[in-house]
Image (cartoon, helix red, strand yellow):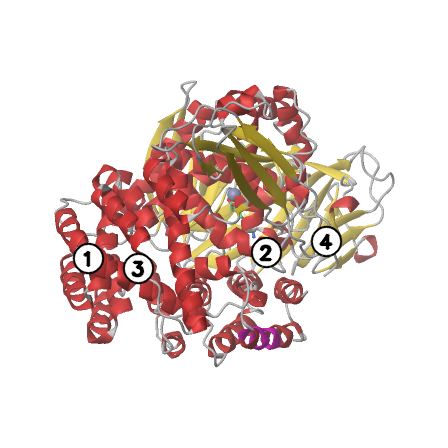
Amino acid sequence: NVAVRLVDYRPADFLIDAVALDISLDRTASKVVATLSLRRNPKGAPGAPLSLDGDDLTLVGVKLDGRPLGPQDYTAAPDHLLLEKVPDGPFTLEIETRVDPSANTQLSGLYRSGSAYCTQCEAEGFRRITYFLDRPDVLSVYTTRVEGDKGEAPILLSNGNPVKSGNLPDGRHYAVWRDPFPKPSYLFALVGGDLGALRDSFTTMSGRKIDLAIYVEHGKEARATYAMDALKRSMRWDEEKFGREYDLDVFNIVAVSDFNMGAMENKGLNIFNDKYVLASPETATDGDYAGIEGVIAHEYFHNWTGNRITCRDWFQLCLKEGLTVFRDQEFSADMRSRAVERIGDVRGLRLAQFPEDGGPLAHPVRPEVYHEINNFYTATVYEKGAEIVRMLRTLIGDETFRRGMDIYFERFDGTAATVEDYLSCFAEASGRDLSHFALWYSQAGTPILSTEGAYDPQAKTFSLTLKQHTPPTPGQSEKKPLVVPVAFALFGENGEKLELASPDARADELARGLIELTDAERKITFAGVASRPVVSALRGFSAPVRLEPAPESADLEKLLACDDDPFNRWQAAQSLALRAIFARVDAAKKGAQTPQAPGFIGALRTILAGADADPAFAAQALSLPSEIDLAREAGHDVDPDVLFSARYGLREEIGRALGADAEPIYRRLSDAGPYSPDAASAGRRMLKALALDLVAAGDPEKGSALARSQFAAAGNMTDRLGALTLLALLGGEAREAAFAAFYEQYKGDALVLDKWFSLQATIPEPATTKRVVDLMRHPDFSLTNPNRVRSLIGAFSNANLTGFHALDGSGYDLLTRIVLELDPKNPQLAARLLSALRSWRTLEPRRRGLIEERLRHIAAQGNLSPDTKDIATRALS
Ligand code: B3K
Ligand code: ZN
């Protein structure tokens, strides 16, 4: 694949004002007739030939202004259609192609999921349906006629509003849809199938009634109730928070089982992985409900940030994705607990984005080059992209941020925009020069922020020195200081928050408790400080940086008790836990006696005692960092087995100390009444699971007995899966019996079975590789369903540190074999799985060597897809 570069961007040579599609669905030979209204782009190269993108297409015929063309008039191949000579004025081109949805295992373009037809066109799937200028800056108005068999596909959907429908001979029928909003081809969608629907309506702020429908497998309509509720809340929230009203007469969502990612924001016709639509108390966990709410909101919010204003080119992907993630995170924070949402978002960022930014796949939020765009739908573009938007809001304030967004919607509606366009709106609203801030978009890598305090008891001053530096990343060896908003506070001896006075900071910085660090270093001396204060820095995680080193333990314990920023209270508990675990790691390496952590355990005891006030927060604060967290924090020469033992040992120490305190909490929370997915109830269930884990950590027999009865009696999936998770860790016959019972109960339900596969893949013991291999032979396993592959192989390689990194290399062999087997069928999925190896250089030498061999073996394969080749090559770079 050739490199595509941002600097090479040129406007298209032609514009396509209107597209009329006529698609006749057939399992193996769907007929596609596309009529394009073309004209030369005044901004394009004069006299340029017309070169249309294709991918795996079979051309049947071409007509220009109604006149059939002969082979001498064009050059056609599966991947392009070239017309050297076309009229200078406007003209129409009619292109007929055939596509085979049944053979489409890549799940890009027109494909089959179960018995339904559906499409996925982002980023470059439309060219697998017809020849087109398949790039996001070519915006057209689409009219789509879909024809299908009435029995096979009674439901025929496309973008926009329904125009007409009718019957045809031979048991066929058709529907015509028209989308009046100009859109790029990646937002095109079509669905045909025999589906059930949950219907509702929403009245917009200006009083327009919108018909809503969620299409699902027959019989599962009731499981879409929560998604429908989330949709209506999203529509209202976007009106209230951003003044954005929905624009079509209908909004349709279709849930399919075979989907490469979470969902897709096609105009007026969102297509979803059914995992993010279907939920019932018996089949979905609290986490699933929260995921549905977030993804429904995300795709809906794209209607303005992504669809009405789209991206000029794929380098600008963060313009829609980072901004829309920011919007869905804010929505969830408003719907649930803001503090718990923030903790969860930061955990996610550290889990997925920090390792990306710290390894060979690091890239700027706005990349400058790609070989395969599908590999850039990353945590950096999405989650770090959202953090940049959040920092912008922090810097200019809520009101100015909203004014900037209003300018953006007003000025760029109906266009394909850039990051510069976006920032210009906030520069205008705030009167600030944002050119330095913009470096966040082009500089890769996670900055390291350090704070150093010096107290002068004579002068009663406290000097705080903030420093930043960003380690080099591939292709960017020199890094510049960034604009880092550091939210901070000082706490006095009795835990009181200090008034801030300093000649070294602006009045607004002191008033807001927000230091803007713009250079490599900044020193601020505070006056009138009666005793050595405790610093709470990076409050609310005000910038996506690493704060190193963490404050001293005594200060952390104090912050845990007195900080009024819940994020930093949680962070204090995490930092203490990390310190206690790494003390054990060091002792183990030296063969020294295991250190105990009485201070930390005392702090946990206090959190547990006050847990009722905010159960979800307490559960978060009481949870130990995962092994994956530990590996990332360790950063180099990682030995997963050592990390596992240290963590497991601390868990036992905590359990022995706090098990007795936890048991009554567990028993009290077990009396919960009927299930409700709301955040407060979910928080209580989270605390209950944590309490049970503490009991089991101290007394495995008792824990197992409680887990077995919870498993048998559970009235909802959260409690049942929580019990099964503990039983899976405890092992033995009880575990196998519970897995068998779970399978019997849910064997017909794919989404629940995914949990069954996942949980087994994450058992932290050496025998798990064999279990995964055996599970691949299970009749319910299939390489063609992405959810199933991710649930078994993805969970094993990303969430089972000891199992996957077994010293004999068996985990790596397994992943290699699957990636190579999957690659010809579904390259996007194969490439995604392979990226589990991205942090290989942080491992100890033996494992590092084993992975490098596998990566070289993969990279050396002859027929590798561009997707997998790109990941393997960059991972080795
Ligand atoms: N925009 C889609 C992602 C498409 C991925 C293409 N490989 C989903 C989303 O972010 O909303
Ligand atoms: Zn998105």
- How far from the left and from the top, in percent, is residue 298? 46, 40
Q: Earlier in the sequence, mark 1 or mark 4?
A: 4
**Residue beneath label 2, please?**
358
Please state which of residues 242 and 821 is positioned toward the viewer in this rendering.
Answer: 242
Q: Secondary structure at mark 2?
A: loop
Q: Earlier in the sequence, mark 2 or mark 3?
A: 2
Q: CA distance from mark 1 to mark 4?
A: 50 Å
Query: What is the C-alpha distance between the residues marked 2 and 1?
Result: 38 Å
Residue ID for mark 3? 752
The amino acid type of the residue labelled 1 equals Gly
Q: Earlier in the sequence, mark 4 or mark 3?
A: 4
Q: Count neighbours of disc 3 (C-alpha within 10 A) and say few if under 14, some if 14 to 19, many if 20 or more.
A: many
Of pointers 2 and 1, the one earlier in the residue sequence: 2
Asked if residue 669 can be seen in this view, the reply is yes
- In the rendered structure, which segment of residues is drawn in magenta? 847-853
Q: Earlier in the sequence, mark 2 or mark 4?
A: 2
Distance in Å between CA atoms under marks 2 and 4: 13 Å
- Residue 477: which numbered mark, if any? 4
Task: Residue type at mark 4: give it.
Answer: Ser
Closer to the observer: label 1 or label 4?
Answer: 1
Tags 4 and 3 in contact by the CB under 8 Å rule?
no
Say which element carries label 3: helix
- Classify 659 as above or below 500: below
Which residue does the image show at 27% across and 44% down from the upper left? 607
